[in-house]
Amino acid sequence: MNKPVKLLMSWDIRSGREESYLQFITQEFPESMIKAHLQPSEAWYTIYGDWPEVTMGFVADDLETVQTFLNSDAWVKLRRKLAAFIKDYHHRVVPLRGGFQF
């Protein structure tokens, strides 16, 4: 039986790229993730502390969906665009559970 999973991503925004980052992350990025069958579940912006500036979560029906996407040309292109706006990117896939996951 397939179990839902969450793709957790985190990064810091490059200085001076905030405006173009915001446009990309609110338009093209979520649309591309939804096309890949990854549903946005949360987005967090850290303003204090030694944590990544941005954390985003996307839910998928199963691990295979996430793995297929992360190995796709679509992800390579999207990640390349994202890299122009961010630094210190990390991701991990965890079993879906209720509440905040990091």
Image (spheres, rainbow, N blue to C red):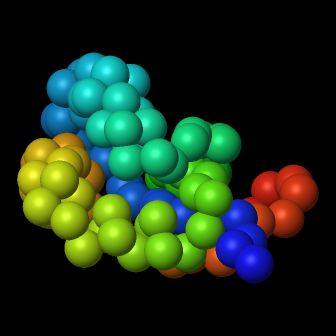
Up-down relation of residue 36 to residue 7 (above or below):
above
The one nearer the camera, 10 or 52, is: 10
* Residue 98 image offset from top left, x and y in percent: 89, 57
Give coordinates of residue 81: x percent, y percent. Answer: 13, 46
Position of the N terminus, as image quadrant, is bottom right
Q: Is residue 55 left or right of residue 12?
A: right
Judge from the rendering whether residue 100 lies leftward or rightward of residue 55; answer left or right. right
x, y (%) of residue 42? 65, 42
Question: Can the viewer see residue 72?
Answer: yes
Q: Is residue 22 visible?
A: no
Q: Is residue 34 above or below residue 100?
A: above
Residue 66 in the figure: left or right of residue 88: right
Nearest the viewer among 2 and 70 is: 2
Counting from the top left corner in percent of width and height, residue 49 is at 63, 61
Q: What residue appears at the point 47 percent right and 47 percent down from the top-left corner?
A: 37
Give the number of marks.
Answer: 0
Q: Which residue is farthest front?
A: 1
Residue 31 position (above or below residue 44): above
Q: Pick the residue in front: 30 or 65.
A: 65
- Residue 71, by quadrant, is bottom left
Figure quadrant of the C terminus:
bottom right
Residue 31 found in image quarter = top left
State the residue at coordinates (10%, 53%): 77
The residue sitting at 54% across, 64% down in the picture is 7
